[in-house]
Image (spheres, helix red, strand yellow):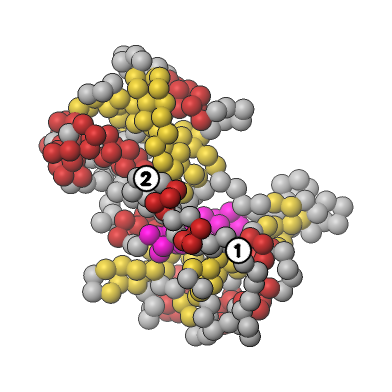
């Protein structure tokens, strides 16, 4: 079957990563995927796509991604639709993700499979893993598409019923919409992403880090929080910093963003200058907070403290701040481990 479509936006052709951002891109972003939104309207198009031999399947099982290990290096297990076409009928949700270099990728939610069955079916292809364990070791495209598939399937799992009338919903537009099946309602529902600000506050020589009570012992990170309705991003930064630490900020500067489908956030990263310095935790979220110099960060492990995950924008905000001030200490800070077990 001929796979044809009208010209569309190609992220790699029309706007390269270096055109869009001058910094090193964060993990899970900038996949180069052509999402081809214009073709989702046509009924039956996804069925046709699943008959094309080059199409690749991206399995998701209970928010875990299928990963294979080749000589100690993990990679995404993107399956041939020809060899695994039988899995489509067993998927709870089937979602068209987009095209990459002319190859279409479709995600399958196979969470209904029992664990032993899932292990047996995919034993020759790899194992289902928490993406956060191996994200930093994947290529940009593979990390991005696994994150995309994980996030959109999480949304489908939680929107099986209409939020307006409570009637069951059905998948439409290649998995990018769910529609209420109640003829008197027919409300459309679309995948959502929750915007969250995450910020490294500093006074020039020191940065403000805190730890949530639920985190592993010794784990410290930047402050963060969700944007509220009617609030600008800069206001959200100032409010969250004050609520969590009692510190006032100024000169809020955007750094970069990161898709964070754990479960459904878009992290908007900032650096901000401290305007006050006394820490007074105004809510009960943080168990501790403090000011740390670059030299402190370089010997963080000696202080029995750890930095955020290596795949997180929190880690990136810290490392970029260190590099601006003491590039000679960046290797030492980069070597500080995360406290999360199992992360490489």
Residue 153 falls within the magenta-colored stretch: yes
Between 212 and 47, which is closer to the camera in this rendering? 47
Magenta residues span 140-158
Q: Which picture quadrant has residue 35?
A: bottom right
- The answer to whether 207 is drawn above or below residue 191 in the figure is above
Query: Which quadrant is the N terminus positioned in?
Result: bottom right
Q: How many marks?
A: 2
Residue 201 falls within the magenta-colored stretch: no
Q: Which residue is mark 2?
A: 22
- The answer to whether 302 is drawn above or below residue 76 in the figure is above
Alpha carbons under labels 2 and 1: distance apart:
25 Å
Position in image of residue 39 (x %, y %): 67, 66
Q: Which residue is mark 1?
A: 8
Q: Which element carries disc 1, helix, strand or loop?
A: loop
Q: Is residue 163 left or right of residue 288?
A: right
Query: Which quadrant is the C terminus positioned in?
Result: bottom left
Tags 2 and 1 touching, CB below 8 Å: no
Q: Residues within 10 Å of mark 1 (few under 14, many from 20)?
A: few
Position in image of residue 237 (x %, y %): 45, 27
Position in image of residue 146 (x %, y %): 45, 62
Q: Earlier in the sequence, mark 2 or mark 1?
A: 1
Between 173 and 93, which is closer to the camera in this rendering? 173
| Res. 300 in view | no
Q: Is residue 92 left or right of residue 204?
A: right
Position in image of residue 285 (x %, y %): 41, 29
Q: Which element carries disc 2, helix, strand or loop?
A: loop
Give the residue at the far right of this rendering. 184
């Amino acid at each position: 079957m001929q796979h044809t479509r009208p010209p569309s936006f190609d992220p790699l052709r029309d706007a390269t990563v270096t055109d869009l951002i001058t910094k090193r891109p964060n993990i899970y972003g900038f996949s180069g995927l052509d999402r081809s939104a214009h073709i989702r309207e046509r009924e039956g198009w996804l069925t046709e796509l699943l008959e094309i031999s080059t199409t690749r399947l991206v399995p998701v099982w209970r928010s875990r991604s299928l990963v294979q290990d080749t000589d100690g290096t993990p990679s995404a297990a993107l399956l041939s639709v020809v060899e695994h076409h039988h899995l489509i009928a067993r998927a709870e949700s089937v979602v068209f993700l987009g095209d990459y270099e002319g190859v279409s990728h479709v995600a399958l939610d196979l969470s209904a499979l029992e664990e032993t069955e899932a292990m047996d079916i995919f034993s020759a292809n790899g194992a289902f893993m928490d993406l956060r364990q191996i994200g930093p070791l994947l290529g940009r495209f593979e990390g991005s598409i696994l994150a995309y598939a994980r996030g959109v399937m999480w949304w489908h799992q939680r929107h099986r019923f209409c939020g307006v009338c409570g009637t069951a919903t059905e998948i439409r537009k290649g998995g990018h919409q769910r529609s209420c099946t109640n003829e008197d309602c027919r409300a459309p529902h679309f995948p959502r992403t929750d915007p969250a600000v995450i910020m490294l506050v500093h006074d020039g020589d020191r940065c403000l880090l805190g730890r949530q009570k639920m985190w592993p012992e010794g784990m410290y990170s930047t402050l963060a929080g969700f944007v509220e309705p009617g609030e600008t991003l800069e206001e959200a930064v100032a409010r969250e910093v004050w609520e969590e630490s009692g510190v006032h900020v100024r000169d809020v500067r955007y750094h970069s963003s990161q898709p964070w489908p754990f479960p459904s956030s878009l992290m908007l990263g900032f650096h901000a200058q401290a305007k006050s310095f006394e820490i007074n935790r105004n809510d009960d979220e943080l168990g501790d907070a403090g000011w740390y110099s670059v030299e402190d960060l370089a010997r963080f492990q000696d202080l029995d403290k750890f930095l955020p995950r290596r795949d997180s924008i929190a880690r990136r905000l810290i490392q970029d701040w260190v590099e601006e001030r003491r590039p000679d200490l960046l290797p030492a800070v980069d070597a500080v481990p995360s406290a999360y077990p199992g992360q490489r």
